Image: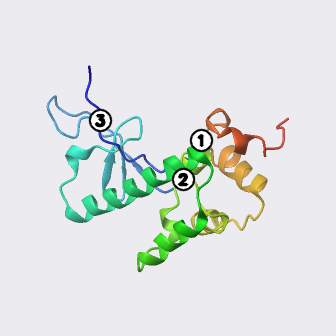
Amino acid sequence: MTATTAPRLRLDRSRPFATVHGERAPGDPHQSVHFAQDGIHFDAQGLHLDDLIEDEKVRALVDKRLKRQIKAAPAAETAESTDASDDADETEQSGSDPAGDVNLDAWLRGDAKYPWFAITKAVRERYHQNLTRLVDVLEFLVFDLKVITEAELDGELKKQLRPQG
């Protein structure tokens, strides 16, 4: 029987990230690094590599994002999340930017829930697109930017898409 593994942070493909290339010697701790974002290393599946975190600031960032990801996951399953509690958490974190913490990749997959204003703000700030309708945001992120494939899109969001022909 395998032991349960700790939850891992997922790469936000909707935000800038770097790809890591090159050959590494066997035994190199960075051998499985494929992506980097905000000082965090990720493997080929887009999951963070906890063993490579050395800086306390990076550790705090991972913990903060992981808490938000874990908190968002049950809300996505029950679909009864309260936006008021999310707004309260964001006001508690002084100096935090709600749009900067929006993981559009997770939102598109249905793994996270965010208030609509935070999603439109994130799209506006990252991509300089002022989109206000859900269908426009979905088509821009899925078909134009290809943040995720249409097959990976959450079922409820997929219903909002116009047929592509």
How far from the left and from the top, in percent, is residue 152?
61, 35
How far from the left and from the top, in percent, is residue 96?
44, 74
Residue hosting label 2: 14
Residue type (three-letter) at the residue carrying disc 3:
Thr
Residue 65 can be seen, yes or no: yes
The reply, left or right, for residue 64 in relation to residue 86 is left
Q: In which quarter of the image is the C terminus?
A: top right
The reply, left or right, for residue 148 in relation to residue 51 is right
Mark 1 element type: loop
- Residue drawn 60% across and 65% down? 83
Mark 1 Cα shell of 10 Å, populated few (<14), some (14-19), many (≥20): some
Q: Do the residues labelled 3 and 1 touch (CB within 8 Å)?
A: no
Residue type (three-letter) at the residue carrying disc 1:
Ile
Residue 13 can be seen, yes or no: no
Mark 3 element type: loop
Separation of disc 1 and disc 2 at Cα?
9 Å
Foreground mark, 3 or 1, reads 3
Residue hosting label 3: 5
Mark 2 element type: loop
Task: Report the coloring of the rendering.
Answer: rainbow
Disc marking residue 148: 1
Foreground mark, 2 or 3, reads 3
Question: Mark 3 vs mark 1: which is more N-terminal?
Answer: 3
Relative to 59, say whether 164 is above or below: above
Q: Which residue lies furthest to the top in this view?
A: 1
Mark 3 Cα shell of 10 Å, populated few (<14), some (14-19), many (≥20): few
- Residue drawn 47% across and 51% down? 12
How far from the left and from the top, in percent, is residue 35?
37, 45
How far from the left and from the top, in percent, is residue 110?
59, 45
Q: Which residue is at the front of the view, 111 or 13?
A: 111
Residue type (three-letter) at the residue carrying disc 2:
Ser
